[in-house]
RNA sequence: CGGGGUGUAGCGCAGCCCGGUUAGCGCGCCUGCUUUGGGAGCAGGAAGUCGAGAGUUCGAAUCUCUCCACCCCGACCA
């Protein structure tokens, strides 16, 4: 049936690329490692942006924009930060036909340019907090790229906040982590584990990195959003101080948090099937497509009239499209909209017209039902919500069914390869054991769950006492 | 950076080993007719610096050399 799409069971990464191609989401550009996000893909990003932007504003944030170029010296001010990012920076050395006095780094992230600016904005506790987000592109010169998951240039949002107290900054870090969790669950329909990264995996320059981790259908983990508690690291590097209520001078506390076009990769790999893309209704650029089926000119006239009547009050309620192109036959259209992941399809032909009904088809399950044309809007709206929650539940069942506790190191190494999945293991917290673990298996410690129940046990590597289990898995 | 692979019409490929008329095929595209409840059929048509450069030759998509680009698999990362 799905011509041109490799089955997941045959070659998962081939399938992933085929789905992107079939749904016309993006393509490789002529620039190595970069992609062209095509209208269908960009429409998904716009919907993601719209929801997140709303959620950011509801939590008190405002948008602003900082420069793409960062003086090289800025990046060097925070030791860990420069060490982490220097290898993957693109640098502009010439401009205007001349060599620049100081090279300009194309932002891999904006902490440094933003904190050099915040220094000018902050004198007093009355200037705090600053709660700014920016929608931007960033560049990280990766060795190996994959559409959406890792590209040289990518789109994201980065929040950068400044606070008077540590407590407030920590609270902000966790608040935004929760915004991401909520977005993932309610919009992406993707269940996520939340937690904190090990020191090795944390953001260069952060005190703590929190993240949401989702499970893809191949049981690998994908980090879908991160929220960093930066402590006073950047304030110290850029000498950003403020006077508190008691006239005492202190460094400002910071957070940053980001979510990128990578989540489109997560969306694809969480829900899509061998017939192509499956989009959760709440993020779907087109929720319903109506396909008229006709034999004669008379048929199509009648159908068009009826469809116009039917859809008159859909405007503003449903994102829909009527596909009455006559150069394609119905089967072709069914397939095309299926590949693109439109959640609900309505088929309507002469027979339906006679019986005052339509055929309603769910993309996620393929289920077809004939329903009355009366009360159709509400029926569709209910169905969309049903699909949304069914998609979430299926993803959650899959994840839960593939998350296991494991206490034996040798067993773990085997099970990570086959059958794969997320494993909850005891870890003593030492970098040595983390290294040992990562060197001997292809998996990494994904998160140390923040809401994880305390449970005493023994480190799976060294046997030393451990207070809680951490999540390990192979990852993207 | 290592390993593997590919560059020929918009896309996917054959032709190359063994040089020789006007470089083929499938899909797509354009025109017309017939079709239309799960990827339509027939007829006609348009479309190519054969990745780039140099060389060998009477003659190069084909042989030689150099370069370039991209994809896939590994080491780094959201």
Image: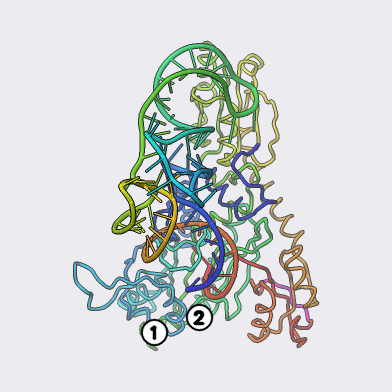
Subunit of mark 1?
A
> Is label 1 in a helix, a strand or a loop?
helix
> Is label 2 in a helix, a strand or a loop?
helix
Task: Indicate how the structure is coloured in the image.
Answer: rainbow
**Residue for badge 1:** A237
- Distance, label 2 to label 1, CA atoms, is 17 Å
Q: Which residues are magenta?
A: A449-456
Q: Is residue A206 magenta?
A: no
* Residues marked 2 and 1 touching at CB (< 8 Å): no
> Which residue appears at 41% of the width and 66% of the height?
A139
Q: Please state the horizontal and vertical placement of residue A328, each as a whole percent of the image.
A: 52, 26
Q: Quadrant of the C terminus of chain A?
A: bottom right
Q: Does residue A393 lie above or below A333 as drawn?
A: below
Q: Are marks 2 and 1 on the same chain?
A: yes
Q: Please state the horizontal and vertical placement of residue A388, each as a whole percent of the image.
A: 64, 46
Subunit of mark 2?
A
Q: Tag on residue A166?
A: 2
Q: Is residue A179 visible?
A: no
Q: Is residue A270 left or right of residue B32?
A: right
- How would you rate the neighbour count of disc 2 (Cα within 10 Å): few for under 14, some for 14-19, many for 20 or more? some
Q: Does residue A322 lie above or below B16 as drawn?
A: above
């Amino acid at each position: 049936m799905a011509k041109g799409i490799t089955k997941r069971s045959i070659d998962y990464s081939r399938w992933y690329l085929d789905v992107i191609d079939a749904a016309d989401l993006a393509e490789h550009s002529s620039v190595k490692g970069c992609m062209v996000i095509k209208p269908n893909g960009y429409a998904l990003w716009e919907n993601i942006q719209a929801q997140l932007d709303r959620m950011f504003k509801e939590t008190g944030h405002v948008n602003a924009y900082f420069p793409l170029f960062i003086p090289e010296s800025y990046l060097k001010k925070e030791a860990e930060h420069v060490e982490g990012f220097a290898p993957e920076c693109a640098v502009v050395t010439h401009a205007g036909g001349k060599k620049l006095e100081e090279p300009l780094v194309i932002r891999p992230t904006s902490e440094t340019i933003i904190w050099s600016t915040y220094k000018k904005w902050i004198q007093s506790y009355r200037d705090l907090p600053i709660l700014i987000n920016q929608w931007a592109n960033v560049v990280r010169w990766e060795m190996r790229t994959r559409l959406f998951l890792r590209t040289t240039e990518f789109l994201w949002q980065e929040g950068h906040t400044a606070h008077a107290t540590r407590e407030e900054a920590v609270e902000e870090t966790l608040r935004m982590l929760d915004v991401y969790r909520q977005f993932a669950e309610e919009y992406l329909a993707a269940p996520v584990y939340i937690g904190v990264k090990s020191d090795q995996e944390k953001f260069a320059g952060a005190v703590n990195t929190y993240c949401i981790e989702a499970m893809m259908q191949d049981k690998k983990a994908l980090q879908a959003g991160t929220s960093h508690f930066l402590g006073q690291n950047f304030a110290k590097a850029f000498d950003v101080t403020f006077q508190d209520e008691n006239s005492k001078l202190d460094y400002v506390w910071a957070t940053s948090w980001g979510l990128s076009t990578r989540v489109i990769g997560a969306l694809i790999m969480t829900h899509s099937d061998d017939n192509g893309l499956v989009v959760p209704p709440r993020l779907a650029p087109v929720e319903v497509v109506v396909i008229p089926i006709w034999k004669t000119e008379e048929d199509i006239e009648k159908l068009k009239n009826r469809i116009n009547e039917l859809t008159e009050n859909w405007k503003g309620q449903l994102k829909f499209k009527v596909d009455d192109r006559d150069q394609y036959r119905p089967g072709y259209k069914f397939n095309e909209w299926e590949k693109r992941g439109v959640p609900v399809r309505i088929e309507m032909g002469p027979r339906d017209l006679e019986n005052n009904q339509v055929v309603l088809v769910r993309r996620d399950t393929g289920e077809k039902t004939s329903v009355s044309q009366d009360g159709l809007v509400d029926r569709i709206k209910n169905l969309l919500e049903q699909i949304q929650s069914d998609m979430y539940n299926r993803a959650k069942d899959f994840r839960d069914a593939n998350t296991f506790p494991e206490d034996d190191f040798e067993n773990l190494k085997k099970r990570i390869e086959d059958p794969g999945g997320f494993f909850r293991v005891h870890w003593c917290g030492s970098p040595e054991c983390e290294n040992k673990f990562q060197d001997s298996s292809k998996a990494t410690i994904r998160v140390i769950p923040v809401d994880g129940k305390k449970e005493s046990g023994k480190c799976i590597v060294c046997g030393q006492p451990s207070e809680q289990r951490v999540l390990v898995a192979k990852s993207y």
